[in-house]
């Protein structure tokens, strides 16, 4: 069973290949990916590494967490699953429904009248 690791506070010079080679010292690396900014094409400063076993992942976390890379102390820990709340932004499939707030909408007060 593979185990996904979060790697944060990376210098912008780190690439997928260099990340893979650093983690390969601790065991089998299934994949490595640096997250890139869509607009600038520049590294976001974090990435993910997938190790072939939980034991390899734990030894990599122990060996690399807090290590200084180009003057930056990197953070290495188990990756957590994404939140299921839909992310940020305020727009969702449900939208801003009237049933969420009783004081908003036509006929319920505000500019539309209703309560006097």
Image (cartoon, rainbow, N blue to C red):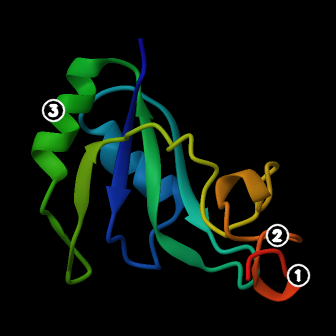
Distance from the alpha carbon under mark 3 to that under mark 1: 63 Å
Indicate the secondary structure of the residue bearing disc 1: helix
| Pointer 3 or 2: first along the chain | 3
Q: Is residue 8 left or right of residue 113?
A: left
Q: Is residue 32 left or right of residue 51?
A: right
Residue, disc 2: 105
Residue 89 percent across, percent down from the top left: 67, 70
Distance from the alpha carbon under mark 1 to that under mark 2: 7 Å
Taking the view exactly as shown, the residue that stands out farthest to the top is 1
**Residue shown at 33% from the left, 17% from the top:** 53
Residue 18 percent across, percent down from the top left: 44, 58
Residue 102 percent across, percent down from the top left: 67, 60
Per the rendering, the mark at residue 59 is 3
| Pointer 3 or 1: first along the chain | 3
The answer to whether marks 1 and 2 mark residues whose Cβ atoms lie closer than 8 Å is yes
Label 3: how many Cα within 10 Å (few below 14, some 14–19, many 20+): some
**Residue shown at 76% from the left, 62% from the top:** 96
Of labels 3 and 2, the one closer to you: 2
What is the quadrant of residue 43 in the picture?
Answer: bottom right
Distance from the alpha carbon under mark 3 to that under mark 2: 56 Å
Residue 42 percent across, percent down from the top left: 62, 80
Indicate the secondary structure of the residue bearing disc 3: helix
Above or below for 62 versus 59: below
In this view of the protein, which residue sits in the foreground, 116 or 97? Answer: 116
Of labels 1 and 2, the one closer to you: 1
Per the rendering, the mark at residue 112 is 1
The answer to whether marks 3 and 2 mark residues whose Cβ atoms lie closer than 8 Å is no
What is the quadrant of residue 107 in the picture?
Answer: bottom right
Above or below for 25 versus 111: above
Indicate the secondary structure of the residue bearing disc 2: loop
């Amino acid at each position: 069973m593979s185990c996904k690791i979060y790697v944060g506070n990376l210098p912008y010079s780190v690439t997928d290949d260099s990340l893979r080679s650093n983690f390969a010292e601790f065991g089998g690396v299934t994949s490595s990916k640096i997250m890139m900014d869509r607009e600038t094409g520049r590294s976001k400063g974090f990435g993910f590494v997938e190790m072939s076993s939980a034991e390899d992942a734990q030894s990599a976390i122990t060996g690399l967490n807090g290590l200084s890379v180009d003057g930056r102390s990197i953070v290495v820990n188990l990756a957590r699953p994404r939140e299921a709340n839909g992310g940020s932004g305020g727009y969702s499939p449900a939208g801003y429904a009237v049933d969420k707030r009783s004081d908003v909408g036509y006929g319920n007060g505000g500019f539309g009248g209703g309560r006097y």
